[in-house]
Image (cartoon, rainbow, N blue to C red):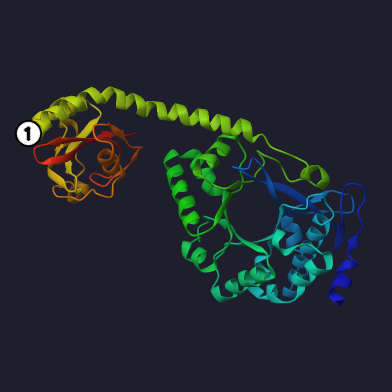
Amino acid sequence: MAEFESMGSLLRAPQAAEGWAADYHGLKLRTALQPIFSISHKRTIGYEALIRAFDNDNVSVLPGHLFGLPHSEAENVLLDRLCRYLHVQNFSCLSDDINWLFINVSPKAVASGHHSDYFFGQLLKRTGFPPHRIVVEIVEQPTDDSARLRDAVDYYKKLGCLTAIDDFGAGHSNFERIWNLRPDIVKLDRQMLVRATDDKSTRQILKGIVSLLHQSGCLVLLEGVETREQALIAVDAGVDFVQGFYFQVPSLSLDKVVSSAADFEGLLNDYKLQSKHEADPSVGIAGFFEPLFRTATNWLSQGHPARFSCDALLQHHAVSRCYLIGSDGVQIGDTILSAKLASNLDPRFRPLENASSADWFRQHYLQRALSEPGALQITRPYLSVSGAHMCVTLSCSYTDSEGAKVLCCDIFSN
């Protein structure tokens, strides 16, 4: 109780729209809020509270200077608690009574074990702020004491708060920690978005990470979105929430930030249009190759050899290989390579070349072809295990004297 009284003496009553402030080592501390948006809901679902420090001339002080002031573990804990006290006090005074408040917990406080005392629970009781509206952010960092990190997450969960792992995707990140801690939300490190912006192939990796986090039971937030291109990448990656300067910068005008909005209608319309344009080439590919497939499957259904039946397909410069699969998913005979591929095989992947009797039953292009007899199917680009290069697969089922079979054709994808 005495600690709250001493902290309370550091707080300054609200002046105009500034909200509460706090005094610390000659600096004035204030709360800034940055909205967090749900893409699907097209609206704000929470706010991250950030500390801002100002000197006696009201000049902004860099965060590094502020957090470099404490010279002991006790002072680190004091500053961490004072920031959280200030944020909760400010947010509890706003008109928003539904959305989440994201609060950072100092990594030093977690490492020291000071998260697990009475303070935060008492803070919520004193302010009357509901625990279920708090998302406690813990930075995803290397630590030799995984039990202490687990205790921190458990403590906030027992209070009724949600938990989030921050900066996931930095060099020390690993999924084992996610599986062990079971956070409610994972915030992806901004560098993942930067890499996806510069390298289109990385966008597929980002999608895979988001999918795996979803399968682990976590909602996913992508922070650091600064451009419309990055916003569209976030939408395409399947993340749940977004945050960044593109949508809104952190603001000290708390009442205004709570009433702010972002144009998700326009963003999602652009994404739908972009997706349609990106899908059109696949439709064009299917339309172009369909007559060649019809000729090949007609010959095959009459019992002609695969090499003869697929000759016209293999003459096309984009085609890399053709192969037949039975209804059980097992490849029938050898893969037939185009002349272009046969003369440019990468010797490093020679162990993957012979696919005779390979079992492709789990491949979606086979399942779709079998479920829609006679309809030409086309995949999205993927990495072919038969040659470790990106390709698109066309597939179509037909029937001969032995039963249902599927003709597959791989096309090089840049």
Q: Residue 349: x, y in percent? A: 22, 48
- Residue indicated by mark 1: 305
**2 left or right, relative to 257:** right
Image coordinates for residue 370, horizontal then vertical, percent: 25, 40
Q: Nearer the viewer, residue 411 or 295?
A: 295
Q: Secondary structure at mark 1?
A: loop
* Quadrant assignment for the N terminus: bottom right
Residue 188 visible from this viewpoint: no
Residue 387 location in percent, x, y? 24, 44
Q: Position of residue 46 (x, y in %)?
A: 70, 50
Q: Residues within 10 Å of mark 1 (few under 14, many from 20)?
A: few
| Observer able to see residue 186 | yes
The answer to which quarter of the image holds residue 112 is bottom right
Q: Residue at coordinates 74% horizontally, 69% vertically from top-left?
A: 76
Q: Does 323 sit left or right of 177 as displayed?
A: left
Q: Quadrant of residue 66?
A: bottom right
Classify residue 21 as left or right of residue 102: right
State whether residue 100 is above or below residue 176: above
User: Is residue 217 positioned above or below 249 on the image?
Assistant: below
Tell me if residue 39 comes above or below residue 189 in the rendering: above
What quarter of the picture does the C terminus occupy? top left
Of 83 and 237, the residue lying toward us: 237
- Which residue does the image show at 19% across and 40% down from the upper left? 345
- Amino acid marked by disc 1: Pro
Callout count: 1
